[in-house]
């Protein structure tokens, strides 16, 4: 697959599985990608970060991971081709969506792999559906992201913007989306492709998701995680500071830490480096499964 725009150099994404719609009874239609590994291999459920999707967050990892694992990735609500709903975005709904994906696919147990926003989703998935989750891998994420003062400020801004997107004409929302979500990507082949992916997102749901992530706090219960766990720590991360990532690892008994030198977007900017470390973390968790 080689996404491109007219006149641009194609950005090659070898190994990116084709996606397909998946109906989740009573919940809506989501979007998944699957990469089959060896027969009988453990299943990884990849849960992407805020404003990304199953293509942009994981495009550089599928080929590596499927050498030893069956891989399933999904688009979260309002992201990519994920579920569209008038309901306010809740991380708990995303966790329940993920459990529904496993159920529809007939996967009894999986290792949940959460990147950034996918970290809280995977934490909630384990808490709400513990029988489905046999291991956890956290990447560039934390058990809590902001202090209370920053949380309150963000809450007010996001609440106002999300309300505005409900009543504004679609043309206005498209212009806001271009400025807020898309202009941050450059005009390299990778950046152009990333812009194409970002244009699939629903602005209102994305804004609500940002608020819910900022409000997330698992510190009161994260130490009850009782499955093999690994943390991929992005050492130059300015979005989720390394000390917050390490606090997450320190909160979980027996959690392993795998450092990778890179910023928060290393999964897209240096996918080969990230994929190798992610593979090590997944192998570590798999080796400790009962």
Image (cartoon, rainbow, N blue to C red):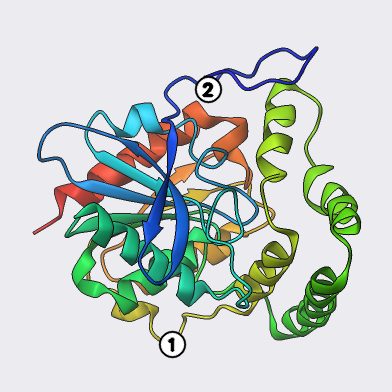
Q: Residue 184's spot in the image, x, y percent?
A: 81, 43
Q: Is residue 251 left or right of residue 76?
A: left
Residue 41: image tag: none
Q: Secondary structure at mark 1?
A: loop
| Viewer-nearest residue: 4 or 143 | 4
Q: Residue 8's spot in the image, x, y percent?
A: 77, 14
- Of marks 1 and 2, the one in the foreground: 2
Q: Is residue 106 left or right of residue 177?
A: left
Q: Is residue 95 left or right of residue 281?
A: right
> Residue at 52% of width from left, 66% of height from top?
142
Q: Secondary structure at mark 2?
A: loop
Residue 262 visible in the snapshot? no
Image quadrant in which you'd find residue 84: bottom right
Image quadrant in which you'd find residue 135: bottom left
Residue 13: image tag: 2
Q: Is residue 47 shown above or below 166?
A: above
| Residue under pointer 1 | 220
User: How crowded is the residue under tag 1: few (<14 C-alpha within 10 Å), some, or many (20+)?
Assistant: few
């Amino acid at each position: 697959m080689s996404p491109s725009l007219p006149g641009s150099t194609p950005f090659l994404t070898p190994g990116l599985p084709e996606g397909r719609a998946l109906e989740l009874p009573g919940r809506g239609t989501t979007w998944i990608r699957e990469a089959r590994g060896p027969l009988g291999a453990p299943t990884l459920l990849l849960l992407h970060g805020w404003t990304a999707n199953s293509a942009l967050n994981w495009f550089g990892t599928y080929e590596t991971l499927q050498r030893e694992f069956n891989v399933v990735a999904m688009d979260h609500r309002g992201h990519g081709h994920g579920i569209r709903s008038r309901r306010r975005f809740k991380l708990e709904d995303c966790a329940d969506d993920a459990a529904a994906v496993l159920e529809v696919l007939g996967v009894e147990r999986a290792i949940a792999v959460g990147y950034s926003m996918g970290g809280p989703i995977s934490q909630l998935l384990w808490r709400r559906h513990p029988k489905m989750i046999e291991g956890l891998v956290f990447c560039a994420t934390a058990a809590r992201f902001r202090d209370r003062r920053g949380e309150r400020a963000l809450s007010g801004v996001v609440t106002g913007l999300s309300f505005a997107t409900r009543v504004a004409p679609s043309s206005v929302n498209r212009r806001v989306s271009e400025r807020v979500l898309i202009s941050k990507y450059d005009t390299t082949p990778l950046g152009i492709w990333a812009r194409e992916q970002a244009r699939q997102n629903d602005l209102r749901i994305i804004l609500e998701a940002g608020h819910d992530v900022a409000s997330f706090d698992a510190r009161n219960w994260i130490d009850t995680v009782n499955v093999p766990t690994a943390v991929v720590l992005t050492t130059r991360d300015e979005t989720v500071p390394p000390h917050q990532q390490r606090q997450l690892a320190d909160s979980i008994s027996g959690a392993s830490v795998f450092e990778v030198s890179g910023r928060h977007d290393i999964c897209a900017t240096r996918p080969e480096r990230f994929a190798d470390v992610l593979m090590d973390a997944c192998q570590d968790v798999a080796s400790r499964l009962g």
